[in-house]
Structure formats: structure tokens, C-alpha cells
Image (cartoon, grey):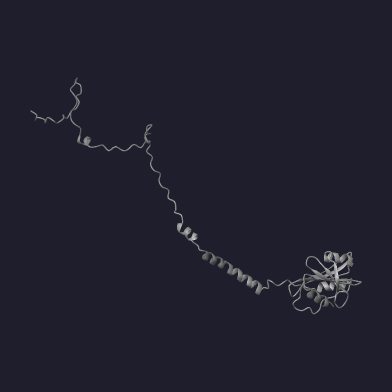
């Protein structure tokens, strides 16, 4: 005779006898089934909110941007006139030193001088007119140009000078007829009377702009001393011709 089974124990074999319907088990869930199930959140798209309900919008992530150089801008805006003057002085000092070196050691302010001898020799070799040159003018006179040229009407020798006072003066000797030479060289200048100079009958003439001229008319040549120099320097050049 078998031992009696406990009342709450389910039979080992739940299969019904032949011809009988299955009997549902009345036993409660297993201890494992009683534990709370861990449900993973859904990974599908978020549900669309119904009309009239405010959408839940997550705030956008802040974008990291570099902060402006406030300190540097502040420093620039706070520059005083004294600082600006010092900065300008730093730039001007090297320029002043370069100018001083250029003028003092390289002779930047000195005019370019030329040797008039080749042009004078060319004029004398042509023998178109007697050629005179100034003598004993002094070291303050500098020759800056010299040219001899010929044309159908005659030949002309021009020598340019810079006077001790820094004025420009030109000595013109030519075989071109005076009636053609004077209007071209003096820009229509008019005679102003005689000039008390040795060595010939010199005439005073007006010239272009603020220039004045001394003119010597000879049978074979015309001599003109013209420029913006003063009367004393013009007379000095005319008197020095030999």
C-alpha cells in the first residue's frame, strides 16, 4: 500500500486517463515566474504625439565655441595716444637714420655732375663758330649738362651749370641766326637794354617764366647766358668766358 501524497503536491504525471479531457493544473506559478520580468525598452521610433499635446523636444546640445579674446581686444582699445606716439617713433627713427646716412655719406643731395670737355672738343673740331669756356668760376659752380648738336640752320653748344646759390644757368653758343635762335631759347623774350659787361656789347633780355638772359651778338655766333639765377651770378658767368 503506497504512502499518502501531500494535498498541495501536483501529480508527477499530468496526462489524463484514456478518454478523459485534460485537466488544467491548479498549481500556482513557479517561484521563478513570480519574479518581476526585466523588460528591455523598445528601440523603435518614438510615438508621435497626438494633436493638441505638446511635443517633448530634447534641448540641443550646446556647441563648444572658443571664447573671444576679450583681454586682447581690451588691450588694443585701451591704447593711449602716448603708446601710439611711441609706436610711430619706433618706425620713424630707422627712416631718419637711413636718410642721414644717404645724405651724409652717399651724397644723396649732391647733383650729378658731368665733364663738359668732350662736348667742347667736338664743337671746336667742327669749327662752326668760335668756342669760349668759362675760367675761374670757383668750386661752387658745378657742370650738370653738356651737349653739342648740329641742325640744318647751324650748330649749337649748350652747357648747363648749377650756381653756388643752387640756381640753374645755361651757356648757349650757336651759329644759328639770332632771329631764329633767340625766340627758341628765350621763348619770345624781349630786349631790356644794354648790360655793362666787358668783352662785347651784351644785351639784357627777358626769358621764360622768371628767368632772365644776357645776350652777345657777334657776326659768326650768338652767345646766351640764361637762367633763374640772380643778376650777379649771370654776370659772373658771362665775365668768365675766355
Look at 45% across and 57% down and name the residue there: 70
The percent coordinates of residue 90 (x first, y second) are: 55, 68
Q: Is residue 96 left or right of residue 132?
A: left
Vertical placement of 1 versus 171: above or below?
Answer: above
Q: Quadrant of residue 54?
A: top left
The percent coordinates of residue 114 (x first, y second) are: 76, 72
Vertical placement of 168 versus 18: above or below?
Answer: below
Closest to the observer, 155 or 46: 155
Among all residues in the image, which is located at the extreme front?
193
Look at 83% across and 75% down and name the residue there: 238
The percent coordinates of residue 116 (x first, y second) are: 80, 73
Closest to the observer, 223 or 60: 223
Closest to the observer, 59 or 88: 88
Among all residues in the image, which is located at the extreme right?
219
Vertical placement of 126 versus 5: above or below?
Answer: below
Among all residues in the image, which is located at the extreme top?
19
Among all residues in the image, which is located at the extreme left?
1
Q: Is residue 114 left or right of residue 45?
A: right
The percent coordinates of residue 113 (x first, y second) are: 75, 72
Q: Quadrant of residue 153?
A: bottom right
Q: Is residue 2 left or right of residue 126?
A: left
| Number of residue marks | 0
Residue 146 visible in the current orientation: no
Residue 191 visible in the current orientation: yes
Closest to the observer, 165 or 159: 165
Look at 61% across and 70% down and name the residue there: 96
Image quadrant in which the C terminus is located:
bottom right
Image quadrant in which the N terminus is located:
top left
Q: Quadrant of residue 34?
A: top left
Amino acid at each position: 500500500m503506497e504512502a499518502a501524497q501531500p494535498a498541495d503536491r501536483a501529480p508527477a504525471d499530468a496526462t489524463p486517463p484514456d478518454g478523459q479531457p485534460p485537466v488544467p493544473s491548479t498549481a500556482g506559478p513557479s517561484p521563478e515566474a513570480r519574479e518581476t520580468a526585466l523588460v528591455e525598452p523598445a528601440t523603435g521610433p518614438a510615438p508621435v504625439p497626438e494633436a493638441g499635446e505638446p511635443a517633448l523636444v530634447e534641448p540641443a546640445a550646446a556647441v563648444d565655441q572658443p571664447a573671444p579674446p576679450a583681454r586682447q581686444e581690451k588691450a588694443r582699445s585701451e591704447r593711449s595716444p602716448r603708446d601710439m606716439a611711441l609706436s610711430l617713433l619706433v618706425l620713424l627713427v630707422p627712416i631718419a637714420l637711413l636718410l642721414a646716412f644717404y645724405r651724409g655719406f652717399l651724397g644723396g643731395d649732391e647733383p650729378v655732375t658731368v665733364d663738359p670737355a668732350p662736348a667742347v672738343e667736338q664743337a671746336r673740331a667742327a669749327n662752326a663758330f668760335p668756342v669760349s669756356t668759362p675760367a675761374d668760376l670757383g668750386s661752387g659752380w658745378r657742370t650738370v649738362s653738356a651737349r653739342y648738336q648740329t641742325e640744318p640752320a647751324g650748330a649749337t653748344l649748350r652747357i648747363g651749370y648749377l650756381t653756388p646759390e643752387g640756381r640753374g644757368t645755361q651757356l648757349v653758343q650757336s651759329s644759328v641766326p639770332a632771329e631764329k635762335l633767340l625766340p627758341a631759347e628765350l621763348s619770345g623774350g624781349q630786349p631790356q637794354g644794354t648790360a655793362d659787361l666787358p668783352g662785347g656789347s651784351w644785351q639784357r633780355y627777358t626769358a621764360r617764366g622768371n628767368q632772365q638772359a644776357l645776350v652777345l651778338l657777334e657776326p659768326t655766333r650768338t652767345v646766351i647766358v640764361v637762367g633763374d639765377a640772380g643778376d650777379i651770378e649771370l654776370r659772373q658767368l658771362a665775365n668768365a668766358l675766355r
